[in-house]
């Protein structure tokens, strides 16, 4: 656990934690909402990077864990009046178990077949939940306003949700770093580079991949629990939104897949860009009103294309390649 | 089977079929501890398939493989590695986006001794020094040339501290200087007490290094013995070499 004392890790944690602390200190609710979204995307991108960047299994359906965790926790809170923290943890564990059960067959697939299967999992899960009455079916579930009383009212619950996402984001980054620097992580990267060679070198790929898949499922699950707790309403199309999944992949590629900081940088840049475009006022072009609200998706597509074609390592990968000396310090 | 006590590997009537092709046909062999055991045979004779059956890449259709008295037939490759069987690949498989040092560390980490990352890194440094890759340790493995990639295969296998090392054509594609370097390395490995099975096309190398030579053709054993016996075996010369000129070179190599 000497890696826990790594200055590199602490610099990231202090920077991210420091920024996250600003709204708590100033009480700025609007900044809090912005940062909530950013920290949530950082968590999603960092966690998908563990299976995609370290292990080489491109997971388009990462969001299925976000939705499942959200649904499990919501169900427990609404029907059993369970405390939020406990519900989120149980939701996270439950999602890990689902990930193990799904991972055992699906992780036998390689490359494009695995990627396609993950889309299938997400879509199947969405359809299942849409028709699953205990989870409210297509309408979903929503809280009574009184649910928040246990957390000091709705206003305080929003702050509570923010504190929770800060903790989860920092935890995800820490775990991502520890995996990267560990023997287990080295095994994952060996699997990414050449699974057959890794196996001959003494690594059990099936076991390593399933464990990794479960770890990468835990953090989005907790994030989903927090997100829907804060929203007070959960429905299938928001919980299992494939688009959000794909956006996470763009962030990982943008920042640098397989690195610790890459997904953080990618999430930050992408989230800022899309919120700027969404909130930009429509302009009138040749007498037609043009809105930017969906433009970030077009830009995301172009960005992804450019990265895949020219800078496969993303921003951090490019830095590491361009300046080999920073390699030792920049993970 | 007279030297059962010192046998490290026993392959007993192993067959492997790919569709209609019988790649291995009831092959049996025994390798004693500390030996260099050479395997020769024309292209497509089933030599690499034999390696793949020994370290568990393919399960055989019939027959048994025993390593140090334990039945390892059909055991997955990572378990074979943990028991002390390491191998190199004929078609090199570098972990391209990892550095040379990381590649070798993987071997040490997950091999027989199951070392921690710190200890494995030390072993990696020693092994890279040993095979002459230390100057390239921070390079990405994909940036190495062919000879260096072969050394990397060797280093990764050695870092696992194996009891048995399977070398699949480590000399192929090397120039004479590189071959000489590699032969020195192989002799040093044997001196450390590691048993070696080597597949090789370079006859002078096999004949000089091996204690025993095994000849495979069309998936079946056609001869086995000391290099002297093999090089004068008429069946080998006829079935395997065919060309009398090559046969002449073959004999010279063994002298």
Image: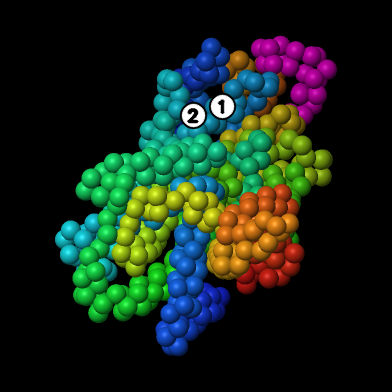
Front residue of A47/B32: it is A47
Q: Among all residues in the image, which is located at the extreme front?
A: A287
| Residue displayed at 33% across by 57% down | A234
Tell me, yes or no, if residue B200 can be seen here: yes
10 Å neighbourhood of mark 2: few (<14), some, or many (≥20)? some
Quadrant of the rendering where the C terminus of chain A is positioned: bottom right
The image position of residue B35, as x and y in percent, is: 56, 37
Helix, strand or loop for disc 2: loop
What span is colored magenta in the figure? Answer: B235-255
Q: Chain of mark 2?
A: B
Q: Quadrant of the N terminus of chain A?
A: bottom left
Magenta stretch: helix, strand or loop mostly: helix
Marked residue chain, label 1: B
Residue at 61% across, 15% down: B218
> Which residue position holds label 2?
B58
Q: Are circles 1 and 2 on residues that touch, CB within 8 Å?
A: yes
* Viewer-nearest residue: A310 or B168: A310
**Drawn side of residue A242 relative to residue B199, left or right:** left
- Left or right placement of residue A90 versus residue B61 in this view: left
Location of residue B182 in the rendering, given as x and y in whole percent from the top left corner:
72, 45
Residue to which mark 1 is pinned? B49
Is the same chain shared between marks 1 and 2? yes
Confirm whether the magenta stretch covers residue B250.
yes
The numbered mark, 1 or 2, whose residue comes first in the sequence reads: 1
């Amino acid at each position: 656990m000497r890696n826990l004392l790594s200055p590199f890790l602490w610099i990231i944690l202090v920077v991210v934690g420091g920024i996250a602390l600003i709204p708590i200190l100033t009480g700025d609710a609007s900044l809090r909402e912005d940062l909530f979204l950013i920290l949530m995307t950082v968590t999603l991108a960092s966690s998908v990077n563990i299976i995609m960047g370290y292990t080489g299994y491109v997971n388009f359906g990462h969001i299925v864990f976000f939705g499942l965790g959200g649904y499990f926790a919501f169900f427990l809170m609404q029907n059993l009046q369970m405390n939020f923290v406990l519900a989120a943890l149980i939701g996270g564990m439950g999602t890990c178990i689902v990930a193990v059960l799904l991972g055992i067959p699906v992780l036998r697939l390689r490359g494009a077949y695995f990627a396609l299967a993950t889309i299938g999992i997400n879509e199947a899960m969405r359809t299942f939940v849409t028709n699953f009455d205990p989870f409210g079916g297509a309408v979903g579930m929503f809280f009574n306003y009184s649910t928040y009383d246990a957390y000091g009212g709705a206003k305080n619950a929003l702050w509570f949700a923010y504190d929770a996402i800060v903790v989860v984001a920092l935890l995800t980054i820490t775990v991502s770093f520890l995996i990267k620097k560990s023997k287990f992580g080295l095994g994952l990267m060996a699997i990414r580079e050449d699974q057959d060679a890794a196996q001959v070198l003494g690594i059990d790929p099936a076991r390593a991949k399933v464990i990794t898949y479960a770890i990468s499922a835990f953090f989005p699950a907790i994030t989903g629990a927090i997100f829907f707790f804060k929203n007070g309403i959960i429905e299938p199309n928001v919980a299992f939104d494939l688009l959000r999944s794909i956006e996470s992949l763009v962030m990982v590629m943008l920042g640098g897949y397989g690195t610790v900081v890459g997904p953080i940088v990618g999430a930050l840049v992408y989230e800022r860009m899309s919120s700027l475009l969404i909130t930009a006022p429509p302009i009138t072009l040749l007498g037609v009103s043009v809105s930017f609200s969906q433009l970030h998706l077009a830009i995301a597509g172009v960005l992804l294309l450019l990265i895949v074609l020219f800078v496969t390592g993303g921003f951090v990968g490019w830095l590491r390649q361009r300046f080999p000396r920073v390699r030792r310090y920049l993970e | 089977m007279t030297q059962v006590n010192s046998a490290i590997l026993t392959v007993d009537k192993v067959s492997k079929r790919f569709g209609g092709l019988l790649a291995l046909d009831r092959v049996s062999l025994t390798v004693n501890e500390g030996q260099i055991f050479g395997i020769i045979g024309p292209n497509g004779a089933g030599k690499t398939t034999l390696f793949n059956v020994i370290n568990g890449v393919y399960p055989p259709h019939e027959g048994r493989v025993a390593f140090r008295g334990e039945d390892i037939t059909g055991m997955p490759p990572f378990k074979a590695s943990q028991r002390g069987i390491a191998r190199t690949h004929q078609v090199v498989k570098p972990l391209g986006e990892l550095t040379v040092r990381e590649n070798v560390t993987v071997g040490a980490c997950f091999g027989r001794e199951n070392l921690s990352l710190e200890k494995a890194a030390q072993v990696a440094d020693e092994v890279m020094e040993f095979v002459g890759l230390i100057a390239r340790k921070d390079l990405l493995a994909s940036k190495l040339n062919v000879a260096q990639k072969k050394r990397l295969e060797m280093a990764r296998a050695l870092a696992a501290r194996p009891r048995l090392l399977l070398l699949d054509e480590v000399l192929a594609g090397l120039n004479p200087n590189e071959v000489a370097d590699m032969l020195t390395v192989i002799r040093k490995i044997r001196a450390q007490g590691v048993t070696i099975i080597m597949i090789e096309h370079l006859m002078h190398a096999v004949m000089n290094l091996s204690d025993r030579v095994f000849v495979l053709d069309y998936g079946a054993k056609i001869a086995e013995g000391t290099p002297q016996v093999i090089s004068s075996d008429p069946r080998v010369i006829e079935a395997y070499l065919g060309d009398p000129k090559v046969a002449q070179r073959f004999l010279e190599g063994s002298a």
